[in-house]
Image (cartoon, coloured by chain):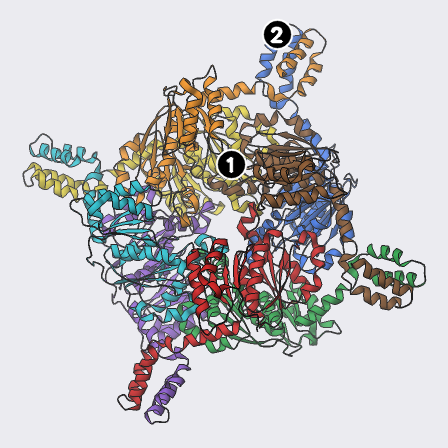
Chain colours: A red, B blue, C brown, D green, E orange, F yellow, G cyan, H purple
Amino acid sequence: MNQRELLKILEFVQTGKLSPAAGLERLKHLPFEDLGFAKVDHHRALRQGYAEVVFGKGKTAAQVAEIVRAMLQKKDSKHNVLVTRADAKTFATVKRANGKAAAKAQFHEVSGVITIERNQEITGKGTITVVSAGTSDIPVAEEALLTARMMGNRVEHVYDVGVAGIHRLLDNREKLMEARVIICVAGMEGALPSVVGGLVAAPVIAVPTSVGYGASFGGVAALLGMLNSCASNVTVVNIDNGFGAACVASCINRV
Amino acid sequence: MNQRELLKILEFVQTGKLSPAAGLERLKHLPFEDLGFAKVDHHRALRQGYAEVVFGKGKTAAQVAEIVRAMLQKKDSKHNVLVTRADAKTFATVKRANGKAAAKAQFHEVSGVITIERNQEITGKGTITVVSAGTSDIPVAEEALLTARMMGNRVEHVYDVGVAGIHRLLDNREKLMEARVIICVAGMEGALPSVVGGLVAAPVIAVPTSVGYGASFGGVAALLGMLNSCASNVTVVNIDNGFGAACVASCINRV
Amino acid sequence: MNQRELLKILEFVQTGKLSPAAGLERLKHLPFEDLGFAKVDHHRALRQGYAEVVFGKGKTAAQVAEIVRAMLQKKDSKHNVLVTRADAKTFATVKRANGKAAAKAQFHEVSGVITIERNQEITGKGTITVVSAGTSDIPVAEEALLTARMMGNRVEHVYDVGVAGIHRLLDNREKLMEARVIICVAGMEGALPSVVGGLVAAPVIAVPTSVGYGASFGGVAALLGMLNSCASNVTVVNIDNGFGAACVASCINRV
Amino acid sequence: MNQRELLKILEFVQTGKLSPAAGLERLKHLPFEDLGFAKVDHHRALRQGYAEVVFGKGKTAAQVAEIVRAMLQKKDSKHNVLVTRADAKTFATVKRANGKAAAKAQFHEVSGVITIERNQEITGKGTITVVSAGTSDIPVAEEALLTARMMGNRVEHVYDVGVAGIHRLLDNREKLMEARVIICVAGMEGALPSVVGGLVAAPVIAVPTSVGYGASFGGVAALLGMLNSCASNVTVVNIDNGFGAACVASCINRV
Amino acid sequence: MNQRELLKILEFVQTGKLSPAAGLERLKHLPFEDLGFAKVDHHRALRQGYAEVVFGKGKTAAQVAEIVRAMLQKKDSKHNVLVTRADAKTFATVKRANGKAAAKAQFHEVSGVITIERNQEITGKGTITVVSAGTSDIPVAEEALLTARMMGNRVEHVYDVGVAGIHRLLDNREKLMEARVIICVAGMEGALPSVVGGLVAAPVIAVPTSVGYGASFGGVAALLGMLNSCASNVTVVNIDNGFGAACVASCINRV
Amino acid sequence: MNQRELLKILEFVQTGKLSPAAGLERLKHLPFEDLGFAKVDHHRALRQGYAEVVFGKGKTAAQVAEIVRAMLQKKDSKHNVLVTRADAKTFATVKRANGKAAAKAQFHEVSGVITIERNQEITGKGTITVVSAGTSDIPVAEEALLTARMMGNRVEHVYDVGVAGIHRLLDNREKLMEARVIICVAGMEGALPSVVGGLVAAPVIAVPTSVGYGASFGGVAALLGMLNSCASNVTVVNIDNGFGAACVASCINRV
Amino acid sequence: MNQRELLKILEFVQTGKLSPAAGLERLKHLPFEDLGFAKVDHHRALRQGYAEVVFGKGKTAAQVAEIVRAMLQKKDSKHNVLVTRADAKTFATVKRANGKAAAKAQFHEVSGVITIERNQEITGKGTITVVSAGTSDIPVAEEALLTARMMGNRVEHVYDVGVAGIHRLLDNREKLMEARVIICVAGMEGALPSVVGGLVAAPVIAVPTSVGYGASFGGVAALLGMLNSCASNVTVVNIDNGFGAACVASCINRV
Amino acid sequence: MNQRELLKILEFVQTGKLSPAAGLERLKHLPFEDLGFAKVDHHRALRQGYAEVVFGKGKTAAQVAEIVRAMLQKKDSKHNVLVTRADAKTFATVKRANGKAAAKAQFHEVSGVITIERNQEITGKGTITVVSAGTSDIPVAEEALLTARMMGNRVEHVYDVGVAGIHRLLDNREKLMEARVIICVAGMEGALPSVVGGLVAAPVIAVPTSVGYGASFGGVAALLGMLNSCASNVTVVNIDNGFGAACVASCINRV
């Protein structure tokens, strides 16, 4: 361990085995990175209210279950646990492997998210509202919603308010205006964030989805639409990245 | 000339020089294309109300002036004349070269269109309304507007109604609902046609513009947005193709 | 309900509980969107002759069957029902779940379309003709054809008339010239709409298909070809969007 | 004016000329959009602290000068004025055209921004720090910086801290950690936001720049890098969109 | 039938029921396309030596078998039969369905081609040589080879001569120089046609293959390489289009 | 010189200074490439009838003039000289620098080609016909035409026969059918080669041009259209590569 | 065999059957490529320390097993054997087919690599260190690591040091600085090589991986990031090409 | 200064003012980055033999001249100075501004490089050979060559050896085999590195150039070709990045 080395140098200086100048030389060649970074990182996690997260994609059910177990057994943490891109089988395995500790585990089928809510404290300052365009955008919207909630935010949603039926969106204007941060999920032409952004003063995190076919190019059309939004309070995350949008939203909701 | 040949065959049949069967054989080997196509084409032009059009781009001022002169000198035609993508110099040359015949020539600076309106008859059945998003989309919108007018249509326009200020668009809903065909011009995210398409029952011709920068990729973002429109009465033409949109709209306005 | 609120305000004004000015203030803060939009939307549907549509893609057989049941049970509607992108299993489930109400349900295997024709009234003004290039374009062409028919249009089709055998297309010229709107479906180089557009005066809705391989890039080659068409009466919809093309065509056929 | 109509209806109800039910009918057919939207928009502007902005690109010097004059003459507004993408000539014209009113006008040559600071009130809650990678990213960074300042934010900058010399970035860690929002401007591989995002808890607005050549594709490489950032507090705006990034940052800095 | 109509007109002219001029009028309005096109097409087929071809992709085994049966039963044709992109199951079905008529049917597993060689006459003037780069390019190369042979050409092949082992290619220089047309099949960087083109005077038809991964983008890298070939006797066909290359080569080998 | 070395080894063997085995060893280490390659290359040039070619693009007028002078001074060659992508200034310089030797030099303004025809012998077996779609494709078409002629081919052209006016193409069917090789030049949707390819039995070399705007992407739309041609006698060269098409056509016209 | 022919010519010269000049003529027409190339190639293999490699992808288990057997039976070679992109089934087949000879065969499940280490000699001059960003990059990293080891290099690895947690990378700085060549594997934004390149003086071979989703476009984002690296000691290989990176690294480690 | 702080802490420990543990605490909170990084960087520069480099692109002549002056005035450095992407005017300004100090300044017109060679010591271990395909690739090749030479490497070049004339390349095989590192510069299809890579055992740094037109897409075709190279000793740098290639080559030439 590095701190020990550091201490030893200081003790040598104390006892005169090293002059301060010689100590300085020695210090310069230590791997400086170990001077407490971990602690900083730890603090950051606390500040952001990050839940413990497992990206389920590309992991076996057993691997996920094991990682979750390690999380649940950490003594000093009561963080919520979130598994993204999981399926029913993984959920069953997680339940089985963690027994009582996973009693609160829930599987959200539409988005493939597993939540274990151990802490319902709301630490975000306002409401994060998730808006989505079509029914097929809901999986990504739900991933965002659950992530935001697991990270200690008050959440709301307004689904199925595509721009081709603008009145449905306008019907929900009040709800939108009450949000502190908006996550706006849309596939196809990705026009929703521009319209929403024009209606509210809050920052809008746009999430393009891979919903569509042909010239939607797996979400590229929506992504480009959002990057070129004519509303000036819109920023963009990667295609289908509901989780990431919620992280940013949660981060803004804490500043 | 082909008709003469044809006639000769028929005369041979009449006079018995050829039996009908032998005439049939001869007819099969004639170049069939000459049997009156030109006339058909002529008819088509009349039905569509097409003005005489010169694409100014890539032509010298002198070339444009000469083509216009040929058009103005056609005896039996009083078609309107339209020059697209021209500049002030071309306009001056056209004026100079055509004297009194070009007395009605006008230069529309914003769109670079020259019009010579010789015929104000309205042949389209309803109104073609041109809607555009930002001020920088106006050149393309104006090209569409002037083209539609030169082709004998009643035209209206609703400019500067971007989706990030949705109320400006809604303020003009009545005007939109009165249109028989809508041309919808937008750059950036190209979301306007989806919103407009959702408000009206008329067909919407969407024109992406190359307005924007960065990830607008010269109009590709708008183009993709429009192709993926969630409104089902939207079709799309090429980037910046105000002229083409007006042709289609005019064609629909005549059916 | 909002109308009730509105009425209450008006009654307060009538009874003097509110001055007109105070009533005005109250009105301004009502969610304006509820002032009858639904009715407007309803009207629009009637005008466009839109059938009831279910997009089968991404829905389970059971979900589709349930949605269809809801449609069939609507008291005041005798709209045709159309399910796109379905399969034999979905069809069986729809039949089973809807009993006698689905007696007229038909499954069109080539395009994966289910139709329940409850209304054969022709409301479109002319004929919509669907033209397609190769045999593999037929699924998209059929989706367009059935959609147009379900929306109350007289329909015709001309299949297998690729541009490399131009005479097959020319053989059908008369049929093409009788159409009020043409839907032109083509994969590979997407050249058909240009040729068809040059032969007729009617608007041509071009549908690129994802048929092809290699540098067809899933329909992009055909899409670009159509966007760059040298015929001026051609507009374009998304790749494989037979349904959308028929919606636009139907919309034009009603103007 | 619409309010007058509304008032008239209410007065008719008050005086019994209309029953409440008949009044309701009349109300439904009013263009609802005029019920105070403008005021709402006005409020939004106030809340966001938006300065008055002119996009200089594509406008003549005279046009810019005229728009600025209109802004400076508004009676009830002391907003800062910001012109983006301007040049020295435009600046001179603006100065000349506005005389004393433009006394505080400044031209920032690197970014082509003109500022007229009429109001130094800080309304943002914390500091917005602009970080940039290479010297050629500075124009975009400066546009962001000036925009944020004109919108009433405390601003800082950390320039020339590319990831290939990671120690320069780490040297500024404390400054980064004090920011409430970070704008991170980078061209080439666009890696800076990921590294910065990993060091801080604040939201990071990433701005790709078109700096680079060859496979940077005018900023696309940087854009993609940022969209795929492995740091979860990063969102992205359009290429070279320093102005937009500052709008979002300012918006976050007010929530 | 059209010929009958034509004959009737001629008979009317013969018998004086129509004057030649009136006959001319009538002729102009006949669908001209039926004046013997089929025959022309037939002739073309003969001249090109085209075998009867079935594209197996997207067709069921039963469909292919039926089409082949129709081909084999044509009285007056002894063309070779070629089925591309087939599999073992399709082959079995074809054999079963056609009994003795398909006695010569062979399945070429590597390329998925079925051949029924009924005619071994060599009608091409010289040798078509198929050159390919890596072992994984062989399926496409074999499709080209078999197609060329079925179309009546003398064929040779030189496989596995990638440019990174240039001596293997040079070892076969004499064989290359004897070819009248060369088909050059290569994936990855697609450099082979440039090198081959530089060694010979014959035309080189380059076929990019979808072999590769990552930045080969399914053959796009090879395609671009070939389009930019610095050898001036190279032309290109679509990715994986072995069949098409052989058609062109056969067509050249007949001129 | 290498032949001398080789000869020396053989003489050593003859005179016994080297045993055959030792000679063999020596031979293996010679740079084999010098064994007569140059001559082979020379022969190839003769067989292909290649004119002497200078690519003018990126060279100064002086550089071009100097290269042309070297060509004209070669004793034993009477090849035609061809300079592509030149301008009037280059032409003047070439004339001035070469005096009487360049008496026959001609500048073809539309295509920017300079020709010096010193040899009118026709060595190609048939006619190469250049077909082009729009007037703006003519520069590329003319480059192809002049190149083919300078290489000793009989050439014809059919210009301005776009597919949207199919009858103009059909009017020229006979001319097309007489060609031994067809070069087909088209921008926009690039559909012409498919239609032409379907009308003739000759090989068709398709040249996409960069003519167009918006979604033509500098010729990419035309290129993709041609690569996906449904006619099986079509191959493709690079965008605007009229020269290259003529090289291939000339090469085919000699086989 | 060619050497025999050559020898015969030399013997004829020795014995006077051929004059040296006539021998020279004969030599010129020999296929020069056979003058010892194989040996050269062999030498190259030795110098590069290339193991015997089988690309498993696209080959059946039986094919791989057979190729391996041929390798193991070569008399004079004790090269290590490497099979890439294999699976458990292939491994079992290889074991079974090769009995004792494959006793040392190992299957590396994460990367799908089979190794048969017959030679542990270290021939590379320094250490090749494989650095990777996320856990999902490990398959590609392991392929690189095993390839490098099989080719006779000392190897190290530093995994899971993504740039969003820069301290983890800095913790390993010493290890990085001891490497003679670094292979840097990263997906998503591909920023790692830039940071690593800035920390060390050794050449860095960057390998983009296809890890990611949405706008990572199967590794394109990472690839572009690496090509635009601001560190000047970075070069790039194809997406997922761990094997290729190790080849280059091994090649550098021998110079 | 930071070292002073560090020393003070150590002195406090020495004199007992701080216990070692308390000293440790203090040390942890120091900005660690200042512990001698600069020196490390300095060392790296020395080891790599990096010349002082100015990227001329985007800088004014005056700016370049000033930077060069600062470099020339550094007391303890005799590094060579290299300015890339400069022009004649910049060169004149540099000369004028630096008088005698710039006596050795040379302008290399083809590549736009300015060199001031103050140190001719060769520190690279072997020869770096720059190979290029066409004459238009020479500017990039020369940039690479001069960069490598300025960095203390022995350099050679082999120009104009395109793959369509493979014998020219083979003629230079010996020169290629003597290189320790090869830089291979090519535009168009970018095939040269594959062929070169197959001939030598040295690492090959491939540089795609933006030379070409149409489907070369500004160097993308060459870039993709190189990334997909079938030779396993090839890595790639950005398009036109001759400077970068030389940096990597120099770096390899020192390991």
Position of the N terminus of chain E, as image quadrant, is top right
Q: Chain of mark 2?
A: B
Specify whether residue G62 is in view.
Answer: yes
Estimate how packed mark 1 is, as few (under 14), some (14 to 19) or many (20 or more) residues with alpha carbons within 10 Å: many
| Horizontal side, residue D162 vs residue A160: left or right | left
Find disc 1 in the rendering and name its residue.
Answer: F185
Q: Is residue D58 positioned above or below E109 on the image?
A: below
Residue H150 in the image, given as x and y percentages of width and height: 31, 65
Residue C250, by quadrant, is top right
Q: Chain of mark 1?
A: F
**Residue lying farthest front?**
A100
Task: Identify the secondary structure beneath mark 2.
Answer: loop
Please tell me how many numbered marks the rendered image carries: 2
Q: What element does badge 1 sit on? A: strand
Amino acid type shown at disc 1: Val
Looking at the picture, how far across and down is residue G227, in whole percent?
A: 41, 58
